[in-house]
Amino acid sequence: MRMNRPAFFLFYLVVSNVIQKRFNEDLLEEIEKFSQVYAERGMAGVEHTLALEVAHEIMDKEFFRILTPEGDVDVSTDMSYWKDLGPPANALQKIKNGTEHVYERLSSPEREYEVRIIYGTIGPGKILQIGQSIKEEAEFLKILRDVFLSAIGLIMILAAVGGWFMARRAMKGVEEVTETALDISTGGSLERRVPVKARGDEVEQLAITFNGMLDRIHTLVAGIRQMNDDIAHDMRSLITCIRGIAEVTLTKTRSKQEYINMAAEIIEQSDKMLEMLNTMMVISETEAGAEKLKIEEVDMVEIIRGAFELFEPMAEKKEIAFTLNVPDTLIIQADPQNIQRMISNLIDNALKYTPTQGTVKISAGWDNGYVVITVKDTGIGIAEADLPHIFNRFYRCDKSRSKAGIGFGLSLALVIAKAHGGDITATSSSDKGTTFIVTLPRVTLS
């Protein structure tokens, strides 16, 4: 409400100035009217017009006097109410000096309202003095002040009630967020959410954002739990394998070569374990955004050609028709090391599950501002039931696709694509091959 007071004061000042200006214009019109009457009919016409003016006015509201430049009164209306009127010497002197019109303001303890006076020449040696009370204008401004004071009191009450209601309404939403956070922090379920009400305000946005954060945390925690279970299972298998190799070897005396073979097998299993842990760390950090992408301008054609040349000997060894169809250049903003790892995993997966005399085709191009990379094979395919799960960590399809590996390749590829704002989709059917389609934006926001 403190802001409303200066606003009202400014409004009041403007209205007051407008009224004063209009009042002065009315006085000036009177001077001009009498000047015209004097020019047409002389003093007789002026006196007659004065008589008509006074007949319609109240004595305490207006007076008229015809003065000489020396201050003598030629003609005057009843001045009994205006006895405290001071000498007009100062105003008359200004008229003598060439001022066309002179305005004065008169206030007195005996008079409730101020009087505005104008002096103006209406003819040779004839100066008209007109005085008018501003009673009506003052009463209007008083009403304006009274209305404002009443209105501002009502507005203050409404503002207090409305402010309390709005604050209570806003705090209710904040309390719900706080209660949900406290409940979760004291061991409650991560599945709990803040009720979202259609308020259309910042509190609703806070609830939506908070729920989105909880969804993200819940997904990450569920992923961690699943990962821990899967890691525990695979680690147990690897450790059991290592222990079994050592135990069998030590059950009886072995030759030096057998001990060497045991050590080599243990090293191989240990390498698998380290590879699984390292890849799992990379996936987790990339997915959580802890590992910042090193974004730079890269040519996808160079990366794809590099991966193609790397796996070409493997394809020749398996007698697979390995083909590449890419344009001269495909420039995007991306992390080259991670993109290379993603492409390599997809090609390796395609060659691994494509039998001899099969075909693996790699192609790339632009589509609506996205680079689209396709890896298509004529391999053993993926069963319809398994297809939705192939990007899950540690997921294994039917035994026909259970090749050597740790089950992280496709998971890592998808995480890298999503970290770049892209995606990977797959279509497949058993014994008819699989097609992986990668889409990457031209610019990665990181």
Image (cartoon, helix red, strand yellow):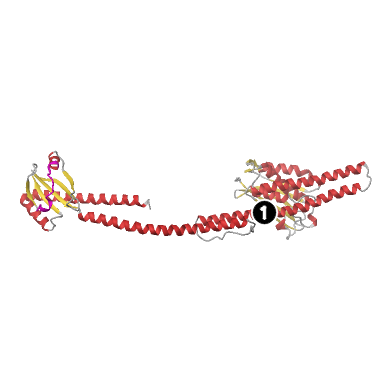
Residue type at numbered disc 1: Val
Task: Give percent across and percent down for residue 20.
Answer: 23, 50
Task: Give percent across and percent down for residue 127.
Answer: 10, 45
Q: Under tag 1, what secondary structure?
A: helix
309 on left or right of 8 = right
Identify the residue shown where x is 55% and y is 56%. 207
335 on left or right of 48 = right
Identify the residue shown where x is 83% and y is 51%. 240
Main SS, magenta residues: loop
Q: As rendered, which of 128 and 329 lies closer to the eye? A: 128
Q: Can the viewer see residue 257 in this picture?
A: yes
Which residue, given by chain and number where applicable, does mark 1 sit on?
221
The quadrant the C terminus occupies is top right
Q: Residue furthest left?
A: 44
Q: Residue furthest top?
A: 97
Q: Which residues are magenta?
A: 78-90
Q: As rendered, which of 196 and 138 lies closer to the eye? A: 138
Task: Give percent across and percent down for residue 97.
Answer: 14, 38
Label 1, residues with CA under 10 Å away: few <14, some 14-19, many ≥20:
few
Task: Give percent across and percent down for residue 88.
Answer: 12, 44
Q: As rendered, which of 272 and 364 lies closer to the eye? A: 272
Q: Can the viewer see residue 315 in this picture?
A: no
